[in-house]
Image (cartoon, helix red, strand yellow):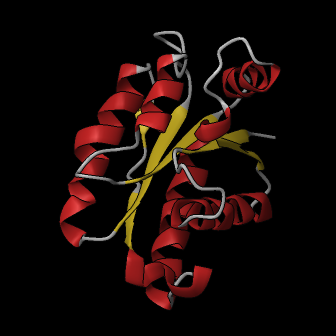
Amino acid sequence: MAHVVLISGSPSASSRTVTVLSALAAQLTEAGLSTSLAHARELSDPQARQTKDALALIAGSRAVVAGSPIYKASLTGLLKSFFDLLPPEALKGKVAMPIATGAAPGHALAIEHELAPLLFALGADAVVRGQYFIDPDLADGRLSPTAAAALAAASSRLIGAAR
């Protein structure tokens, strides 16, 4: 069974990014993939057991999803700091997908200009087209019908590439 590690770069435990990643994890699990959700805010100490466990999960995974809120047109420093702990070819042999959330539609380019290049720089064999969600897509901690359809499409792309 293919394993997918989803990493949240959000500084908050309950955030729009976590909402999207949790919904994605549920879809992947329903499709027969195993998943783990890690929170970069808990993984800053490279010597901590929790950080080492997360790095080991990534090493043993088939796919990695990098999720981040977009602040000032960029991914969070938390997510970048965590990815800086990975060895240069940590994603070699893996599929990766970026997911982002933000307040303005204009920040959607952060997927292609920030997250995808980071995943390729870590050696990902392929970066599956991800998805950007804006605040109205995630009102009241739930995905709107449009956002749910977009996430289902992203999930299908990842499932197809990860098998």
Question: To which quarter of the image does residue 58 belong?
Answer: top right
Query: At which x and y percent is residue 67?
Result: 50, 49
Residue 113 appears left or right of 84: left
Query: At which x and y percent is residue 156?
Result: 55, 62
At horizontal 60% and vertical 39% (from top left) the residue drawn is: 41
Query: At which x and y percent is residue 28?
Result: 70, 58
Residue 90 appears left or right of 101: right
At horizontal 41% and vertical 35% (from top left) the residue drawn is: 77
Query: Vertically, is 13 above or below 81?
Result: below
Q: Nearer the viewer, residue 153 or 74?
A: 74
Q: Hey, which residue is sitting farthest left in the picture?
A: 106
Q: Nearer the viewer, residue 61 or 140?
A: 140
Query: Vertically, is 118 above or below 96?
Result: above
Query: Vertically, is 33 above or below 96?
Result: below
Residue 154 appears left or right of 56: left
Would you say residue 163 is visible in this rendering?
A: no
At horizontal 53% and vertical 79% (from top left) the residue drawn is: 148
Would you say residue 38 is visible in this rendering?
A: yes
Quadrant containing the N terminus is top right
